[in-house]
Image (spheres, rainbow, N blue to C red):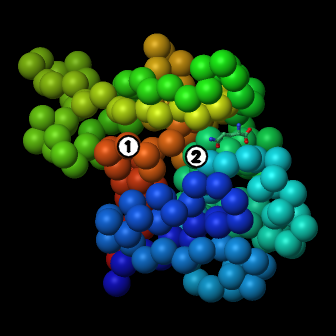
Amino acid sequence: MSPTIAVLALQGAFIEHEQRLQSLGCTTIELRQAADLARPFDGLVLPGGESTVQAKLLHDLGMFEPLRERITEGLPTLGTCAGLILLADHFRTLPVTVRRNAYGRQLGSFHAEGRWEGGAGATKPSAATNAESRPGAHGASTPAPVPLTFIRAPRIEALGSDVEPLVTLNDAPVAVRHHNQIAAAFHPELDDDSRLYEALLAPLKRAY
Ligand code: GLN
């Protein structure tokens, strides 16, 4: 048995998430209409795209409230870029302040390297042996940098209670965790680093 992850597939960059999840041994289903919510799934991915379009479609299709309830009840959820905005500003299940398109329209898209702040639980698979982190331990190596692709990205401006940074860029959080919710301003589905997915799947893998 492998966990089944539902990927919101109304608009935006959902295919790449499905491919990554499948490569990590998950079964994926697409959420396109309210009836899809009746299918069993263990986790949820909210992809990048346009958050205003996605929110409108969720309301129009009658999917908004049922999904918000599932997230509130503890469904493991990963939101990326527009997905982060959905969690913070629309579902309001994630207590962070975000500013849309804050990394600047001129910049549009850019690549950077961030710092993994999520502890040694999840290591970058391609660098598994030397990515173990034991902060403060003598001689311990630091985690591998996290490749970050930003596309008209929101900036995380303030963290509410019980929100911990998972990835930072110049000490500013660009991915965070709040209980069952993980959200990133960047697009992990576009780079060769699965640590955010592993963080999403960790509680599920224990159950299977
Ligand atoms: N700018 C988009 C929004 O505000 C997010 C961009 C993205 O998901 N790549 O929804």
Residue 145's quadrant in the figure?
A: top left
Write down the residue under mark 1. Answer: 191
Camera-nearest residue between 35 and 149: 149
Residue 73 x %, y %: 68, 64
Question: Dividing the image into four equal quarters, which quarter contains ligand 1?
Answer: top right
Specify whether 5 is left or right of 55: left
Q: Note whether residue 156 is visible.
A: no
Count numbered badges in the picture: 2
- Of helix, strand and loop, which one carries label 2? strand
Q: Nearer the viewer, mark 1 or mark 2?
A: 1
**Quadrant of image for the C terminus:** bottom left
Q: SS at mark 1?
A: loop
Residue 160 placement (x, y as % from top left): 69, 31
Q: Earlier in the sequence, mark 1 or mark 2?
A: 2
Q: Is residue 164 left or right of residue 64?
A: left
Q: Is ligand 1 less than 8 Å from the beta carbon at label 2?
A: yes
Which mark identifies residue 178? none
Question: Which quadrant is the N terminus positioned in?
Answer: bottom left
Give me the residue at 36% from left, 54% from top: 198
Residue 72 placement, left or right of 135: right
Residue 44 vs 161, above or below: the answer is below
Rendering coords of residue 121 (x, y %):
30, 45
Is residue 59 shown to the viewer in this render? Answer: yes
Mark 1 surroundings: few (<14), some (14-19) or many (≥20) residues within 10 A: few
Residue 98 appears left or right of 195? right
